[in-house]
Amino acid sequence: MTAVLSAERLTKQFTKDDSAIVALRDFALSVEEGSFLTVLGRSGCGKSTMLNLLAGLTEPTEGTVSHRGRKLEGPDIDIGYLTQSDTLMPWRDVRRNVEMPLEIRGVKARERRKTAAGLLRRVGLEGFEKHYPRELSGGMRRRASLARMLAGTPRTLLMDEPFGALDAQLRTELQEELLRLWQGSGQTVVFVTHDIEEALLLGDRIVVLGGLGRIVADERIDLPRPRHVDALRVDPEFVRLHTAMAAALKEGSS
Ligand SMILES: Nc1ncnc2c1ncn2[C@@H]1O[C@H](COP(=O)(O)OP(=O)(O)OP(=O)(O)O)[C@@H](O)[C@H]1O
């Protein structure tokens, strides 16, 4: 296995009103190149803290993160991060937000426009190119952020509950679109979710976090692709994994 992203002995401690809050303790993870890893965990177990560290956005109190064999010292253009909070630039319209990573890479205007138009179509935002973020719904802003992250074609994608706020139909469409874009791309994905079904539908490995980022389950998902929810729900392997992950989540929170 070639690990593209790895965390060793990661601890993150915050200080609030003179008291220490440990969000993650002695966390270790190794993510295989080209794989789709889903991370499941209850609210507050340290998932966003973990992603912030893997993205190089925050510094660990102890331990190291390595990306493509190099110690991560800060944000890296090869790591795309879709955070839970809205990071679209309010003064740029949707198209220019999506074009931003291409601008940073020095891509010519015509090429940028073409790539942005294609991605906006894929996330269902065709016709909204000239809208500003304040003129979009929360779900639309989420999709614009997704298109912007994909525009940069980062080799590693970190996603923090990207589809949580979307309606069920849109969620299914975007899950399928994400898989289409990922398959054959060679990109590595770390996808955080609360939803067991979503984790099993998307990933080829699932990790369940308990309190302080303790790994309580780590399993391969060997379900054939393409996966369809209706067929999966009656698949014995899916049912087994679903039951095991639900038990792991319960164990992790006790
Ligand atoms: N900047 C901060 N300062 C103080 N405490 C923090 C900070 N960021 C996170 N924490 C604490 O660390 C713990 C883990 O938070 P984190 O956001 O990583 O959880 P999470 O699993 O992503 O939760 P959710 O699923 O609700 O987003 C929580 O107890 C939280 O209060």
Image (spheres, rainbow, N blue to C red):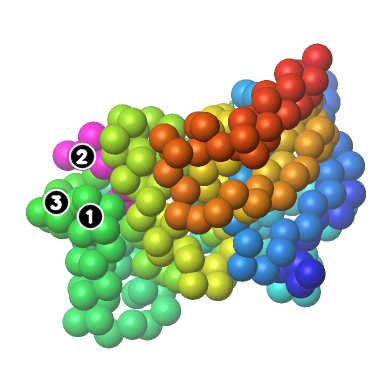
Residue type marked 1: Val
Question: Is residue 223 shown left or right of residue 183?
Answer: right
Q: Main secondary structure of the magenta part?
A: helix
Residue type marked 3: Phe
Residue under pointer 1: 94
Query: Decide: marks 1, 2 in contact (CB < 8 A)?
Result: yes
Quadrant including the N terminus:
bottom right
Bounds of the magenta segment: 135-144
Q: Secondary structure at mark 1?
A: helix
Neighbour tally class for label 2: few under 14, some 14-19, many 20 plus, Cα within 10 Å: some
Residue 128, label in figure: 3
The x, y position of residue 167, in whole percent, is: 31, 30
Q: Is residue 180 above or below residue 16?
A: below
Tell me which label, 3 or 1, sits earlier in the chain: 1
Residue type marked 2: Leu
Note whether residue 219 is visible: yes
The magenta stretch spans residue 142 = yes
Residue under pointer 2: 136
The x, y position of residue 223, in whole percent, is: 59, 49
Quick check: which quadrant has ligand 1?
top right
Tell me the quarter of the picture where residue 196 sits: top right
The x, y position of residue 164, in whole percent, is: 43, 32
Q: Is residue 230 above or below residue 225?
A: above
Tell me which label, 1 or 2, sits earlier in the chain: 1
Note whether residue 67 is visible: no
Quadrant including the C terminus:
top right
Q: Secondary structure at mark 3?
A: loop
Question: Is residue 181 shown left or right of residue 154?
Answer: left
Q: Secondary structure at mark 2?
A: loop
Tell me the quarter of the picture where residue 65 sits: bottom right
